[in-house]
Amino acid sequence: MSKHGRLTRQAVLATGIAATAALVLAGIAHADNINDAIADGGTGLTLVAGDASSVGQTTVKIVAAGNDGEPGCNIAAGESLTISFVTPAGVTANPATLSFTSCTTLPVSFTAAAGAVGGSVTATILTNQTGGPNSGFNNNVLIPITIQQPPSSPPAAAVLPADANGAEGSALTSSGSFTDADGNSTLTVTKVSGAGSVTDNGDGTWSWSHTSTDDGAGTVIVQATDGKYAPVTETFDWTASNVAPAIGQVTSNRLGACQVSVNAPFTDAGSADTHTTVINWGDGNSTTIDPATTPSAGSHTFGANGTYQIGVTVTDDDAGSDNAAASFATQNTPSAMMQPINAAGTKSVFKLGSTIPIKITVTGCDGNAVSTLNPAVALTRVDTTPDGSVNETAAETVSTNGLAMRWSDPQYIYNLSTKLSQHTGAALTAGTYRVTVSDSSFTGPVTAQFDLRK
């Protein structure tokens, strides 16, 4: 400033409004002891917290007070005047200070961070006209700051879920997402109705899964809420189709010459399904069972000899079915060894040199005698010491040539010679012998023991 008198300067904060902000200076002049001042005449500043686009902008200009006796700007060459802005918490001035070397208009803007609070910006003259400290100035102007919170927005549907289609017993899935201008993390996603479970991923996205124990269909409604506005929903449908049961390995288990049981395990993806098992035994007869109460597939006795194809069909309550088969061949039933050999009780003892009749009967599944077989006879010496004394009468009959029995209604017979045995090629000697009659159609061989002695 000029040396021949103290000059009064005036800082005028002129109003400049940007988008959502306006600046008002309080219309108060603060004079100091050397007649310099900041005077203003505007309105307050409004900012939106956390909104980077919300900027309050104005300009500052240094002018002559007009009452110092000198016209025009009073800042002389080499002189300066600095104004600093002290802001409330969360409010930032850009730039934080303005330095004037002339009466130039300089801009300043203000922004408010998230969480900023209201208050006042203090514009203060820091240095005097000669560049020295502002020890005597008291030219502060308060700029009122009003902070608005960002406008709240309701949630909205974003990615809509696709319908879920699959099979019972398999996991069905779908997913979707919601959005919120206030931040997707503010959303809480839950299932309103329908089957399955919904997972909230915490960012507006969600996933759904459901494993149906039976065929079926339904609708699922998923909602998102931010706690402020009415929830928004997304909806999709699901369908689980029936899966037919699958039969594993069917096995036929012999219970007798003409009796069989069948085991037909199966699986079904629909664990809630009920089932019916039908066994066609191959002879015109069938059995229907509930496998839930009868785990095996049942048993059957055939009334005639033969090889039978047994068919098994498992059907679920939705008409899904599977088929499998097994075979079973009946056998003939031989009798125990007949007289004169005792099959049980006291062992038969024959005299050496006797011809011993070996006799059995054979019946089929119809209960009638079977006469078309050639049962084989085998003889094994068990020991050389006979027990007891002779208790059987030697038969007067022609011995059988060969090792096979012959049919002699109503029985099969084989005359075993002890003088010249077909089994040894020589006469038998004293001891205990086991005789065995077998045939491939028998359920098992027929055996008995007898003794030979002098």
Image: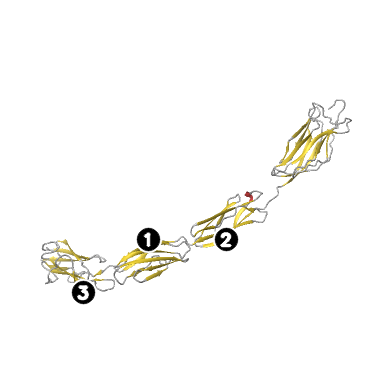
Verify CB contact (< 8 Å) between mark 1 and mark 2. Answer: no
Q: Which residue is under mark 2?
A: 219
Residue neighbourhood size for the residue with mark 3, other residues' Cα within 10 Å, grouped as few (<14), some (14–19), many (≥20) = few
Judge whether residue 308 can be spotted in this image: yes
Q: Identity of the amino acid at label 1?
A: Gln
Residues 454 and 67: in front is: 67
Q: Position of residue 397 (x, y in %)?
A: 12, 71
Q: Identity of the amino acid at label 2?
A: Thr
Judge whether residue 138 can be spotted in this image: no
Q: Which residue is under mark 3?
A: 410
Question: What distance separates the C-alpha of mark 2 from that of mark 3?
Answer: 77 Å
Q: On the image, which quarter does residue 87 sit in?
A: top right
Left or right relative to 22: residue 188: left
Q: How many marks?
A: 3
**Eye-nearest disc, 2 or 3:** 2
Q: Which residue is under mark 1?
A: 249
